[in-house]
Image (tube, rainbow, N blue to C red):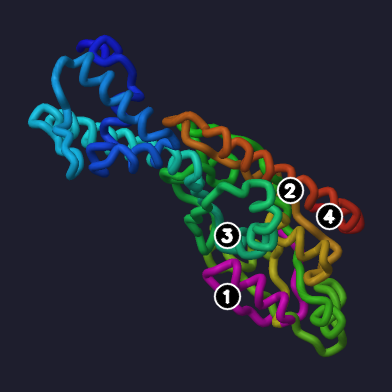
């Protein structure tokens, strides 16, 4: 392909010619490029002299393209339109929001992420978040998302894995519930505790609760839900006691909207991890969001540490 610089004296002459041909006036082209009318006429004359052909028929009535001028104008018009479209696409890509997709539990998003959305958008103003929500226990393949939270051991070599938080379970309820009903170990006289249970768990309810709080006496009232977000909302409303996974309840404990309803808590030895597929590079913004989430969770754990120190670990 012959270089354009060898065919014309300057690209500016082509730009000026296209404007004059499009507007039908050297004066209009001059205004478009902030030039004088004689300067536009001179640029066009230089282009015509270089090509050796007239591009306009000039008359007292105005300017009219010659056949050769019409061919050149059509080619320039089409080419400049493609250049303009390309520039607009480049600018749009630069300003377009980056999309980041996260696979998290409904409860975690409701009680941990949503209260932090203001802080998140302040830290990442150009990010458009997408959530794939899991209503019950966090399990199953992460799928084609940027980051997923899963229990340690749920991922294989196909995923990058970063520690996020330990699995730590505390029986929690509202301050009003605790005042009315007492702790699980020392219930108020004549009171039977209501236990709010997530049915979507691998362990039977008695085995799970017994592992956390030991013997339940007197016989409790059970209410089961398949969505952990609903379990915690019921606990906040004072309807009973829920098992609070620290990843979800740490903020509520710090605010005092949930309080321990037992002297015990359970460290399972497992932990939650953030995962990303090895099938594609981890984008810089995804790594930054991962680090932000880890730092926020670390602050939650530090805030909860004095409270956990007061409870016996089992």
Give the mark toward the camera: 4 or 1. 4
- Cβ atoms under marks 4 and 1 closer than 8 Å: no
Give the mark toward the camera: 3 or 1. 1
2 in relation to 147, above or below: above
Rounded to the nearest whole Å, what is the CA distance between mark 3 and mark 1? 13 Å
Instruction: Give the label on residue 20, or none.
Output: none
Query: Secondary structure under badge 1?
Result: strand
The image shows residue 215 at horizontal and vertical percentages of 76, 68
Instruction: Give the label on residue 296, or none.
Output: 2
Q: Is 72 positioned to the left or the right of 101 in the image?
A: left
Front residue of this view, candidates 96 and 31: 31
Mark 3 highlights which residue? 203
Mark 1 highlights which residue? 224
Rounded to the nearest whole Å, what is the CA distance between mark 2 and mark 1? 31 Å
Q: Which residues are magenta?
A: 211-238
Seen at 76% across and 60% down, the residue is: 251
Tell me, yes or no, if residue 270 can be seen here: no
- Cβ atoms under marks 3 and 1 closer than 8 Å: no
Instruction: Give the label on residue 304, or none.
Output: 4
The image shows residue 160 at horizontal and vertical percentages of 54, 32
The image shows residue 135 at horizontal and vertical percentages of 51, 63
Query: Secondary structure under badge 4?
Result: helix
The disc, 2 or 1, on the residue closer to the chain's N-terminal end is 1
For residue 222, what is the image quadrant? Answer: bottom right
Seen at 66% across and 70% down, the residue is: 232
Query: Residue lying furthest front in this view?
Result: 60
Give the mark toward the camera: 2 or 1. 2
The magenta stretch spans residue 295: no
Front residue of this view, candidates 26 and 202: 26
């Amino acid at each position: 392909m012959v270089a354009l610089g060898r065919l014309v004296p300057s690209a500016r002459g082509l730009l000026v010619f296209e404007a004059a041909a499009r507007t039908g006036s050297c004066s209009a082209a001059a205004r478009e490029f902030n030039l004088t009318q004689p300067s536009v006429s001179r640029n066009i004359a230089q282009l015509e002299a270089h090509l050796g052909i007239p591009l306009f028929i000039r008359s007292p009535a105005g300017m009219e393209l010659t056949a050769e001028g019409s061919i050149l104008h059509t080619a320039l018009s089409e080419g400049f339109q493609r250049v303009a479209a390309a520039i607009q696409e480049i600018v749009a890509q630069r300003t377009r929001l980056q999309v980041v997709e996260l696979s998290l539990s409904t409860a975690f998003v409701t009680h941990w992420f949503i209260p932090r959305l203001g802080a998140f958008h302040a830290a990442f103003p150009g990010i458009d978040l997408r959530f794939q929500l899991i209503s019950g226990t966090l399990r199953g393949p992460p799928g084609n998302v940027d980051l997923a939270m899963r229990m340690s051991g749920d991922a294989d070599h196909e995923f990058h894995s970063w520690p996020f938080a330990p699995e730590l379970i505390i029986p929690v309820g509202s301050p009003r519930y605790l005042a009315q009903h007492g702790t699980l170990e020392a219930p108020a006289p004549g009171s039977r505790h209501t236990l709010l249970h997530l049915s979507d768990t691998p362990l039977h309810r008695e085995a799970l609760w017994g592992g956390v709080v030991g013997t339940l006496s007197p016989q409790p009232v059970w209410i089961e839900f398949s969505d952990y977000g609903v379990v915690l909302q019921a606990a906040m409303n004072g309807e009973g006691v829920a098992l609070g996974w620290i990843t979800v309840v740490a903020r509520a404990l710090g605010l005092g909207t949930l309080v321990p309803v037992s002297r015990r808590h359970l460290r399972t030895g497992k932990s939650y991890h953030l995962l990303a597929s090895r099938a594609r590079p981890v984008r810089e913004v995804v790594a930054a969001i991962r680090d932000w989430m880890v730092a926020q969770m670390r602050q939650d754990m530090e805030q909860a540490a004095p409270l956990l120190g007061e409870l016996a670990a089992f």
